[in-house]
Amino acid sequence: MTGQLAFVESPVQLLNVLEWAHTRAAATGAPSVAPTGAPGSADAGASVRATPSTDATQGGAPAAPALTVVVLSPTDPMSRGQLRRMAQLARDEGLTVHWQEARRGRGALVRTLRELARPLRSAERVIVGDPFSRYVQLLLTLFGPRHLTVVDDGTATMEFAAQLGRGERLVRWHRKGSALDPRELVLAPVSSFAKRRLAPTRGRTVEIFTSLPVEAPEGITVTENSFAWTRTRFGPPRLTGGADLVGTSLVETGVVEAGHYDRVVGELARTHGATRYFAHRRESAEKLHRIAVETGLQVVRPELPLELIARRGPIGRTVVSFPSTVVHTLPLALAGTGVRVAVCEIAPEWLRATASPRAQGFLSGVTGTAAHEVDRLTSRTAGPADRLEFG
């Protein structure tokens, strides 16, 4: 059987590809990977040493089709650094990793399409981490795989499943996506064609591998991501006595006003006795400096996705987050450790006037569908500051 090809653009996507491979191996009784011996590296062409998963079924079990991960490298340093470290973890699991400088230098796009067209057309299964990515959508125009898997890249999976089920065009929830936007008009044919590639047909199966509560569109299989690989490989963590806060890029994406965000972070830190602030990789240096100075929190730039950082520890006995993927993933990764996860709702008055009309509903949905083990913090306006209470 021809191999499997995964395209990732973020550390979380690569983590979820590893989780998918682990779950697939457990379901089929085959080793997690079957390396081809092809070259791969985090930045160049170093050879890959195959190291089969320690809990994969051995003996006479058939080998799973080879899984090659193509990293479509982003340009921001934080994402690149985390991806390098995740790529090493993937190589340690025996996967072939190819680092593709897809966004650097003139001609990068054409070169990438030329280099990937052949393996794309021959792959039995293609795994993508971000169906909203313009790069992935362009790649989807080059092939029609027999099997397609979409793994989580944050809460966008919920919006993807909903839009696909309703037959809508694919637009990220925090973008207005006006049909009159010149950029949208230019890319509309690519997005429309990619949407058809992401839908199941008589000759193509589509799977969503997710830890999020999604309603499966007709004909699509939803497979649960329980973070079994993360729990098997790391921890349990040592717990500290205090609390940790998890940052978000809602300010950077133009959803939440910076002043409201800073004030609520300070209130959360005081209420819960937090000492550390785990920054999102897209948060600006200016905002993080302001938070550190005004709240006294230790700002931590994680070297790996937060699920792995928390599982390896040390981690606070309470982890407080704004609406994001971690309110769904951390309870799974930290199951049985005694860590309490809480989510702080986004009040309507915190939103910027230019935020997408869908923003409040989407963020409320992320909070409302969090696991039962997650505490919900509600905000009530009380003068100059927001008082946070358990809901």
Image: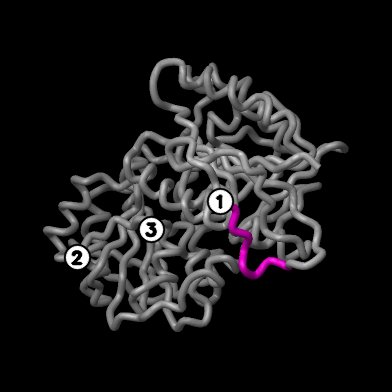
In front here: 118 or 214? Answer: 118
N-term mark: 3 or 1: 1
Q: Is residue 181 visible?
A: no
Which quadrant of the view contains residue 132?
top right
In front here: 322 or 230? Answer: 230
N-term mark: 3 or 2: 2
In front here: 114 or 202? Answer: 114
212 with respect to 234 (left or right): right
Residue 49 marker: 1
Residue type, label 3: Ile
Query: What stretch of residues is rendered in magenta?
Result: 49-57
**Alpha carbon of mark 3 to alpha carbon of mark 1: how far?**
46 Å
Please give the residue where the numbered disc 2 appears in the rendered image. Answer: 297
Q: Is residue 224 visible?
A: yes
**Residue at (39, 40) in percent of width and height:** 355
Q: Is residue 54 magenta?
A: yes
**Foreground mark, 1 or 2?**
1
* Numbered disc 2: secondary structure: loop
**Alpha carbon of mark 3 to alpha carbon of mark 2: how far?**
21 Å
**Residue at (53, 29) in percent of width and height:** 134
Q: Position of residue 319 (x, y in %)?
A: 37, 72
Residue type, label 1: Arg
Q: Main secondary structure of the magenta part?
A: loop
N-term mark: 1 or 2: 1
Q: Position of residue 94 (x, y in %)?
A: 59, 54
Q: Position of residue 39 (x, y in %)?
A: 56, 38
In front here: 114 or 55? Answer: 55
Pointer 3 and pointer 1: residues touching (CB < 8 Å)? no
